[in-house]
Image: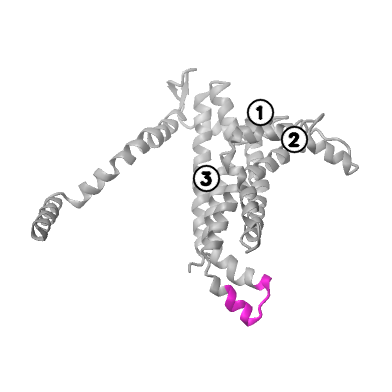
Amino acid sequence: MMAAKEQGALKKAKARKGIPSFVEGMLYLLPSILLFTVFLFYPMLKTIYLSFFLTDAQGNAQLFVGLEHYSNLLQSDSFRTSMKATFLFVLYTVPAGIIIALFLALLANQKLKGIGFFRTIFSSTMGMSVAASSVIWLFIYNPAVGISNLMMKALGFSEMQWLLNPDTALIAVAISTIWMNTGFSFMILLGGLHNIDSHLYESGKIAGVSDFYSLRKITLPLLSPTLLFIVTVSLINSFQTFGQIDILTKGGPMESTNVIVYSIYKDAFVNFNIGSASAQAVLLFAFILVVTILQFKWGEKRVHYQ
């Protein structure tokens, strides 16, 4: 019986040797390659192609204009305003979101009674869609019945038009975005904390080091691979923010929240200027690619692996 099984295994091995390893590997990857080609590579190449053309309302290329769309964008005050709003939005959301998520993860990593309840609360925003979360914040910022102005009154401040004031609209959207994204960052960082060997902390306690020293010399260095991942993902997500902008402010007031992705949406589906929208998308892709590469180059020098 065993001899028959061994013979069958040998036959399968010989049959497998007859197929080149490269071909076999490509066959396994074929479903993924097809999906990426249809939903990623083709749209990306089509976007680059359309950025060199004037198009009709249906997005069909009509007249080749070369780099004219890119030249017009670099000279456009509206595009510069969109880039400024995007950079400010990233600056508001990424550092604050990561710091809050790290603080919550450090709290939830403590071995305390009932800490599981707080872990659930801290990660609860992961289960909510951007649309549902944005509607909640739309009510919070409501000038008449929103809890934000009720709290301002209670603290002795005057009411604010959070989403209607150009000076506060972007900050208001950033606060809601931080709230939406904290759950994901919290869960990833908590998982990273669980992977740190507890014996290192026990050795630190025996040596008499403080909690702050342990955080600085043990936790943060060993958590650095997870932090690199969170920073990279958070940067990419911030540059691609759209849903909460569309629901809360529509890019206003006075284009103060008109981030680059929302500008692409307006050019493509409101003004039907597909060529300009494609050029903006290409510039955004190039910028995110450069930022990600620099992030990895800079981060790899500071990442410590166990």
Q: Position of residue 143 (x, y in %)?
A: 80, 30
Q: What range is drawn magenta here? A: 201-213
| Marks 1 & 2, CB-CB < 8 Å contact | no
Residue at the image position 64 percent from the left and 61 percent from the top: 106
Q: Secondary structure at mark 1?
A: loop
Residue 210 included in the magenta stretch of the image: yes
Judge from the rendering whether residue 102 lies leftward or rightward of residue 61; answer left or right: right
Question: Along the polypeptide, which appears first: circle 1 or circle 2?
Answer: 2
Residue at the image position 57 percent from the left and 48 percent from the top: 184
Q: Which residue is mark 3?
A: 288
Q: Nearer the viewer, residue 269 or 201?
A: 201
Residue at the image position 61 percent from the left and 32 percent from the top: 131
Question: Along the polypeptide, which appears first: circle 1 or circle 3?
Answer: 1
Of the 4 image quadrants, the one containing the N terminus is: bottom left
**Above or below, comparing residue 128 to residue 19 in the picture:** above
Q: Which residue is mark 2?
A: 140
**Above or below, comparing residue 268 to residue 197 in the picture:** above
Q: Classify mark 3: residues with Cα within 10 Å, few (<14), some (14-19) or many (20+).
A: some
Q: Secondary structure at mark 2?
A: helix
Q: Classify mark 1: residues with Cα within 10 Å, few (<14), some (14-19) or many (20+).
A: some
Q: CA distance from mark 1 to mark 2?
A: 17 Å
Q: Position of residue 12 (x, y in %)?
A: 13, 52
Q: Which residue is mark 1?
A: 250
Q: CA distance from mark 2 to mark 3?
A: 32 Å
Judge from the rendering whether residue 281 lies leftward or rightward of residue 215; answer left or right: left
Q: Position of residue 113 (x, y in %)?
A: 66, 60
Judge from the rendering whether residue 246 lies leftward or rightward of residue 2; answer left or right: right
The residue lying furthest to the bottom in this view is 207
Q: Amino acid at mark 3?
A: Ile
